[in-house]
Image: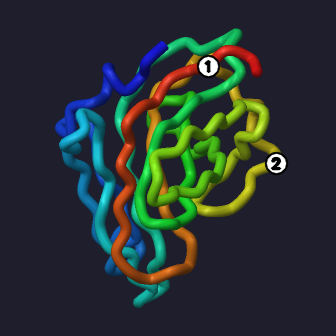
Amino acid sequence: MHLLSQIVSPDLWTCVNDDVMGGRSTSRITRSDEGGIQFGGTVSLANNGGFAATKAPCSVDLSGQPGIMLRVHGPPRRYRLTLRTEPGGRISYRVPFWATPQLATHYLPFARLRPMRRGQPRPDAPPFDAATICEIGFLIGDKQAGDFVLHVHRIQTYAAL
């Protein structure tokens, strides 16, 4: 299932940066020239800052699937794929991946997702439920100040490897 086709419009994406807590990071989401989306901006470590994120609604049942496959590229930085299973919920389920200058494929199994709230692990959170995904997103918070850009070519499920 090719999920990016459902959420390719930049108008569906919302950016949430550390300015919600006094930071100065900025981000934007645009349509890339390659037909996907581009998440870019600047991470600032000033005023307890240090993260930028983007998210889009994505109501989909992925039960029975092993995870998400991403085709991405960009300057080498650590990102996280984020998924939510409860609309407006406080818990996001995250898994890290690294962007590279060359287009790369990342297989991110649901079993590697970790529940988080405000950057803190939540081991008491309910288990991830792939049947109730309502939001997908990307987060950068690698404790490195500076510009970033993640070119997302494809988001889809994959067959068990």
Residue 114 bears which disc, if any?
Answer: none
Q: Position of residue 129 (x, y in %)?
A: 68, 23
Q: Is residue 70 left or right of residue 29?
A: right
> Element type at marker 1?
loop
Q: Amino acid at mark 1?
A: Tyr
Q: Position of residue 71 (x, y in %)?
A: 48, 38
Q: Which residue is mark 1?
A: 158
> Element type at marker 2?
loop
Work out which quarter of the rendered image holds the C terminus and state it: top right
In the image, farthest residue toward the bottom: 46
Closest to the observer, 61 or 127:
61
Closest to the observer, 8 or 35:
35
Q: Is residue 92 left or right of residue 149?
A: right
Note whether 52 is above or below 96 in the view shown. Answer: below
Asked if the residue under mark 2 is in contact with the one under mark 1, i.e. CB atoms within 8 Å, the reply is: no
Identify the residue shown where x is 75% and y is 51%: 122
Choose top left, top right, bottom left or bottom right for residue 88. top left
Q: CA distance from mark 1 to mark 2?
A: 27 Å
Closest to the observer, 94 or 85:
94
In the image, farthest residue toward the right: 123
Q: Amino acid at mark 2?
A: Pro
How many labels, in total? Answer: 2
Residue 123 bears which disc, if any?
Answer: 2
Q: Is residue 7 left or right of residue 3?
A: left
Identify the residue shown where x is 35% and y is 36%: 56
Note whether 60 is above or below 71 in the view shown. Answer: above
Q: Residues within 10 Å of mark 1 (few under 14, many from 20)?
A: some
Choose top left, top right, bottom left or bottom right for residue 133. top right
Q: Position of residue 152 (x, y in %)?
A: 38, 42
